[in-house]
Amino acid sequence: MIIVLGAAVVGVLVEAFVPRGPRHLVQVLLALVALAAAFVQVVRLGGTEIVGAVGSVAIDGPALFMQGTVLVLAFVSVMFFAERRIEGGADAFAPAASSLPGSEDERVLVRERVLQTEVYPLAMFSVGGMMLFPAANDLLMMFVALEILSLPLYLLCGMARRRRLLSQEAALKYFLLGAFASAFFLFGAAFVYGFSGSVRFSDIDAALGARIGQEGLLLAGVGLMAVGLLFKIGAVPFHAWTPDVYQGAPTQVTAFMAACTKLAAFGAMLRLFYVALGGVRTDWQPMLWAVAIVTMVVGIIVALTQTDVKRMLAYSSIAHAGFILTALVAVDQVAVSAILFYLATYGFTTLGAFAVVTLVRDAGGEATHLSKWAGLGKRSPLLAATFGLFLLALAGIPLTSGFVGKLAVFSAAFQGGAMPLVIVGVVTSAVAAFFYVRVIVLMFFSEPAAEGPSVAVPSMWTTFGIGVGVAATVLLGVMPGPLLDLAEQASVFIR
């Protein structure tokens, strides 16, 4: 975490002092080297179990697994940020996010092809918060991590080079709703502190069996904190921001958020509910049962009606949050390992899917309306086949990573006695296959329109990132054993 956050600070200095010419390359290399160095350090720490930072940070199996996964996904995301060939020498970000959309200042910056480079230190700050979030061992540190990962994302969502007003609207919605969610979490933490007299998870757990008569204060706090975390994973009814933000943000940022933020938020939920609040599981399990069912059903049903690819993937991500919640209610080591595996496989698939979206273009930029994707298989069979693979993985088709992930979480839920959740999950997965296959049929069995989209030729950055997504999707579907074993070994929380 120190490596990543230190690189973010250095990135701010690079933005201020390095000349414009080499600045973009310096920022990209700085971010990639820092992420790679941090990943090496995470691997070296494998097997470590220690509580540090005056008891506020816990380094154990689940924390290290999620930190390593976040770093790999962030490494690929930075490559997508660095893509310049698609925009004719520019990147996907506005040359100056503070300039008024459509103003003369912005036109001058666009004409001079000024590149936005502050996105890299912002992304690194966010990655640092994502690494801290699942390792936080007390409520205050968890809140600090929540803000560190969230505030840079609010800014990144408003930095799109094209459709600036839509992008800024997405950033404003995300900021306002995210501020409310953070306030709920902090208010809930205050209630739990009032009950236990401490913000440390081990002290809260000890207080659950020792204090009688203050259950109302405790349960109110648990409910309020759950609101803040459920917002971050995009669970219903706290999901309204997801489709608007995913659609309006630069697609590279959308991919970064969809893959990494969900992973970090579920890591924090696991530690909070399993380590600190495991003693009152019978009180919060019914709430998560209801949220999981509603999230799966609403996510799938609304996705069926979408005509925009990014919004369809947004509602798909909502449904996947529901699938993961089915395992979370089991509260055992099998559930933890299943969730760790699912989050890793979902992250690679989602990154790849959104990267493909950036390559389908028309005169206005990205062609995200589904009608524009008709006949894509005849214009670019390789790109359409790649996107089809990612859709099949999201649908949970056998021989893809998505199938193994769903099998793992549903098996964990079944063993944990949540058979009704498994039934709902299987049924909604079958329904979800319809709108995923619908896009595949549209690409391969429809004639392309005369004014249909073009397919941009990516540079090595995006090509490598998509290749990583394809390889992970296939290999983890055919040979999931090594990652499943690693997740199982990393599934024990330090207390």
Image (cartoon, rainbow, N blue to C red):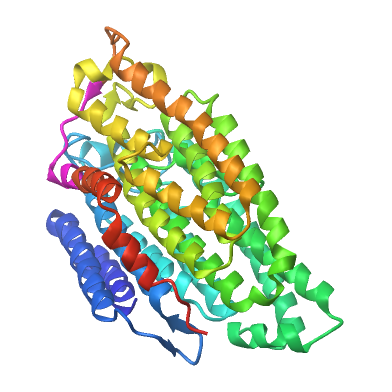
Q: Nearer the viewer, residue 152 or 116?
A: 152
Q: Of all residues shown, which one is farthest toward the bottom?
A: 54
x and y, in percent, of residue 393 in the image: 36, 39
Q: Is residue 395 positioned above or below 284 on the image?
A: above
Q: Quadrant of residue 63?
A: bottom left
Residue at 39%, 85% (x, y): give it.
Answer: 49
Q: Nearer the viewer, residue 108 or 86?
A: 86
Range shown magenta: 454-464
Residue at 44%, 48% (x, y): give it.
Answer: 407
174 on left or right of 310: right
Q: Is residue 430 positioned above or below 41 on the image?
A: above
x and y, in percent, of residue 424 in the image: 61, 41
Q: Is residue 97 positioned above or below 132 on the image?
A: above
x and y, in percent, of residue 136 in the image: 50, 77
Image quadrant containing the N terminus: bottom left
179 on left or right of 122: right
Residue at 56%, 55% (x, y): give it.
Answer: 413
Q: Quadrant of residue 277?
A: bottom right
Give the number of callouts.
0
x and y, in percent, of residue 103 in the image: 39, 36
Q: Is residue 132 positioned above or below 236 on the image?
A: below
Does 400 lie within the magenta span?
no
Q: Nearer the viewer, residue 294 or 160?
A: 294
Q: Quadrant of residue 482?
A: bottom left
Q: Of all residues shown, which one is farthest toward the right?
A: 213
